[in-house]
Image (cartoon, grey):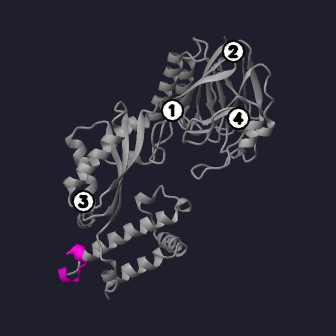
Amino acid sequence: MRRLRFLHAADLHIDSPLRGLDARDGAPVERLRGATRQAFVALVDLALRQQVNLVILAGDLYDGDWTDFRTGLFVHAQLARLAAPGILVFVVRGNHDAESIITRQLPRQDHVHVFSSRSAQTRVLPALGVAVHGRSFPDRAVTEDLVPGYPAPVAGCFNIGVLHTSLTGSPDHGTYAPTRLDRLIATGYDYLALGHIHARQVVRESAPRIVFPGNLQGRHAQEIGPKGCEIVTVEDGYITQTEFVALDVVRWHVLSLDCQGLEDIDALCDRFAASLEAAIAADRDRLHVLRVRLQGDSRLHRVEACQPGTLEAALHAWLHQRDLADVWIERVLLQLRSPLDRAAAAARPDAVGEVVRLVDQLTQDATALPQWALAALGSMPVLPADLGDVRAERLTPDDWRALLADAEAMVLAQLGAGLSESALPDDAA
């Protein structure tokens, strides 16, 4: 029986820069900065431990051109560990590490094959009964479908196609080397090792198996959950086992807490504790980074409005009291609303009534709301930090309404702070 084992990873983005996290108080900067490297070390360790025959890297090994040689030397040294046991490495360049982007060079490694960017190539390994096909990006902006140029499958071999592609498109990623599922199937290959989409996705289970393994290490709150690689076992030309292996050393989470009915900070911390335990119970051997969303109608909104920063500080303090060194709150997003009798508030002749009437009007018109919001944001010289990673084109009508409700609650609480008790809505008195 002829047996082949290979490891498929993509989008490693080695030394990807932090996104302003080092400016946040208490940020575990060194652990975050070194996460992509540590995940790559874990990948090489796994390849050695599992005694795979091939390591396939489907693009974006690097995040861009090296600022100096240290990035390249680190990767070179890790790949060198695979040479002695005879593990071969196959690499295609993607949009972040295209041929035109990586300007510095190091000596070629005999066991590492980087596919040409001029045309698709095939490497046949008769002893293993496998043929690997691939093509690198010549430039960052590859807009044509590369699949038609891939060679025909090699008879008698297990055929692996390696491609960096956006496939039919993703709202989270740019469109590069787009193609269609039917064209991938028509290659006649047995496995399509894809890269570019950072969320793991099994596009097709078999005949052929088509997989985006996702990126190796999440880098921000849009890249949540386990990150890692695929290990595939092939016996006599057929896939007999596949396994996803998590290798991330920093895991990102978004915790959405329903604060409906919560009256005070202690109640908030109790709910946070339960949600956190559910999120990290099975994986305590890595750093967990949290983005916390506080949602719902709650008097906590009044607490926050009177002293901005209170709720985030309370959650940080709760962590400090329990000495949870492997948990860090990156940001707390407030989507709270003050309990409000809307009909009574809208009937008021003052600023409170004006705000409620405007919100009701905008909420009823899915077209007017984003136009009004974008015009308001456009007049601001600097956007709030919490909106730094928001893409307006990706927001749904429900997203816009949620943002508007949050803004309304903040404004009403601030208005209430300057009014007499008799003039306040019932919840603000």
Label of residue 413 in the image: none
Question: Residue 429: image x %, image y %?
Answer: 19, 75
Q: Earlier in the sequence, mark 1 or mark 2?
A: 2
The residue carrying mark 1 is: 228
- Which range is magenta? 421-429
How far is mark 2 from mark 4, CA to CA? 24 Å
What kind of residue is marked 4? Answer: Ser
Question: Can residue 146 be seen from the camera position used here?
Answer: no
Label of residue 128 in the image: 2
Nearer-the-camera pick, 384 or 251:
251
Mark 4–mark 1 CB contact (< 8 Å): no
Dominant secondary structure (helix, strand or loop) of the stretch shown in magenta = helix
What kind of residue is marked 1? Answer: Gly
How far is mark 4 from mark 1, CA to CA? 22 Å
Q: Earlier in the sequence, mark 1 or mark 3?
A: 1
How far is mark 4 from mark 3, CA to CA? 54 Å
What kind of residue is marked 3? Answer: Leu
The residue carrying mark 3 is: 262
Q: Which residue lies at the image location 61% right of the left edge and 30% below the top edge?
A: 57
Q: Secondary structure at mark 1?
A: strand
